[in-house]
Amino acid sequence: MELSSLSSRYTVRPLLEDDVPQILRLFKGNPLYFEHCPPPPSEDGIRADMAALPPGKTARDKHYLGFFDGGSLAAVLDLIDGWPDDKTAYIGFFMLDAARQGRGEGSRLVSSCCGALKAAGVCRVRLGFAKGNPQSEAFWLRNGFAQAGAERPADGYVVVPMEKLL
């Protein structure tokens, strides 16, 4: 899949070590997320997230992406190709800069990404959000995701699995 197909509005590229300070600023602008999904944001935590993989996947399957408006980081997306199966993409993380929220930008971006994934042959997108986070729950429901399976404990919170058929 060509990364530019994920958004017609933003420049999309893999995030690198040099981007960590900008990612941290974006994360710190969204404190509600980290109240429900610890630990608090840190540079070391970001580096760990950039490398984290689900079982059976390799770095080739992971896309830790930045969506840029000029030089400004507008959103971060952690996307795993082919997990948990070949026809599924997994969103490990999605966050929009707080200054861009509340105007439908996040929903347009998710819709654009889902369209590009569908065109690439993906049949469904899965993710999990931290139970009790009303902002995350409302966002994913509004974007056509529904609970898919049993909640499961994580480190300091409970994950609600969600899925959207494409």
Image: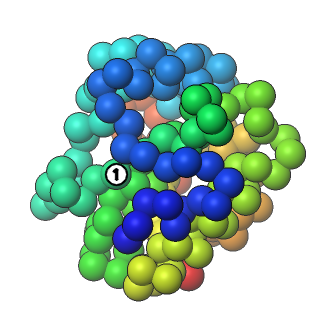
Q: Position of residue 162 (x, y in %)?
A: 54, 63
Locate residue 18 relative to residue 117 in the image: left or right.
left
Residue occupied by mark 1:
63
Q: Is residue 53 above or below residue 87?
A: above
Q: Is residue 17 above or below residue 165?
A: above
Q: Residue at x 25, y 40 (%)?
A: 52
Is residue 39 visible to us here? no
Q: Residue at x 15, y 55 (%)?
A: 58
Is residue 30 visible to us here? yes
Q: Residue at x 50, y 31 (%)?
A: 37
Q: Nearer the viewer, residue 46 or 19?
A: 19
Location of the C terminus by quadrant is: bottom right
> Quick one: label 1, few (<14), some, or many (20+) residues within 10 Å?
many
Q: Residue at x 68, y 54 (%)?
A: 9
Q: Is residue 28 above or below residue 116?
A: above
| Residue at the far front in the pictured view | 70
Q: Is residue 17 above or below residue 13?
A: above
Q: Position of residue 1 (x, y in %)?
A: 38, 71
Q: Position of residue 140 (x, y in %)?
A: 66, 57
Quarter of the view holding residue 39 = top left
Locate residue 37 relative to residue 85 in the image: left or right.
right
Q: Amino acid at mark 1?
A: His
